[in-house]
Amino acid sequence: MLKWALLAGAIVSEVTATLSLRAAIDAPWWYAVVVVGYGAAFTLLALVLARGMPVGVAYGIWAAAGVALTALLATLLFDDPFTWPMAAGIALIIGGVLLVETGSHTAEKETV
C-alpha cells in the first residue's frame, strides 16, 4: 500500500513541477518549485521501484496520470484549451496503462 502512496506523491510532485514551469515565465522564483518538484518526483518514483513495483507499471501510471492531470489543471489555471480529442487521447492512455497493469499481474501468475 505504501508504494501506491509514494507513486501518488511522485505524480503530484511531477505535475506541480510541470505547471510551475509555466508560472515561472512570469515569476522566475517558481523555478525553485520546479527543481524541488522534479527532484521529489524522481526520488519517490525510485522508492516505488525499490518496493517492487514493475517499472513498466510504475512509469506508465506516473506518465498517464501526469499527462491527464497536467492537461486538466493547465486548463483551469492557465486557460489552456481542452478539447474532445484531448479527452479521447487521455482516455486511450488510461486504457493502455490498465492493460499494462493487468498484463503484469497475468505475467506474475504465469511465472509462479
Image (cartoon, helix red, strand yellow):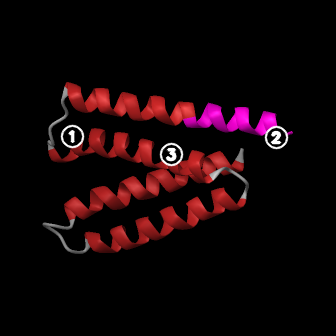
Q: Earlier in the sequence, mark 2 or mark 3?
A: 3
Mark seen at residue 75:
1
Q: Main secondary structure of the magenta part?
A: helix
- Residue at (43, 42) in percent of width and height: 64
**The N terminus is located in which quarter?**
top right
Query: What whole-number distance in Å separates the C-alpha atoms at marks 1 and 3?
Result: 23 Å
Mark seen at residue 64:
none
Residue 69 is situated, as x and y percent measured from the top left of the image, at 36, 42
Query: What whole-number distance in Å separates the C-alpha atoms at marks 2 and 3?
Result: 22 Å
Circle 2/circle 3 CB separation < 8 Å: no
Q: Amino acid at mark 3?
A: Gly
Q: Which residue is mark 2?
A: 111
Q: Is 112 above or below relative to 6? A: above
Residue 80 is situated, as x and y percent measured from the top left of the image, at 15, 43
- Secondary element under disc 3, as helix, strand or loop, is helix
Range covered by the magenta-colored residues: 100-112
Quarter of the view holding residue 98 = top right
Residue 40 is situated, as x and y percent measured from the top left of the image, at 50, 66
Q: Which residue is mark 3?
A: 60
Q: Callout 1: few (<14), some (14-19), or many (20+) C-alpha neighbours within 10 Å?
A: few
- Secondary element under disc 2, as helix, strand or loop, is helix
Residue 70 shown left or right of residue 26 in the figure: right
Q: Callout 2: few (<14), some (14-19), or many (20+) C-alpha neighbours within 10 Å?
A: few
Q: Amino acid at mark 2?
A: Thr
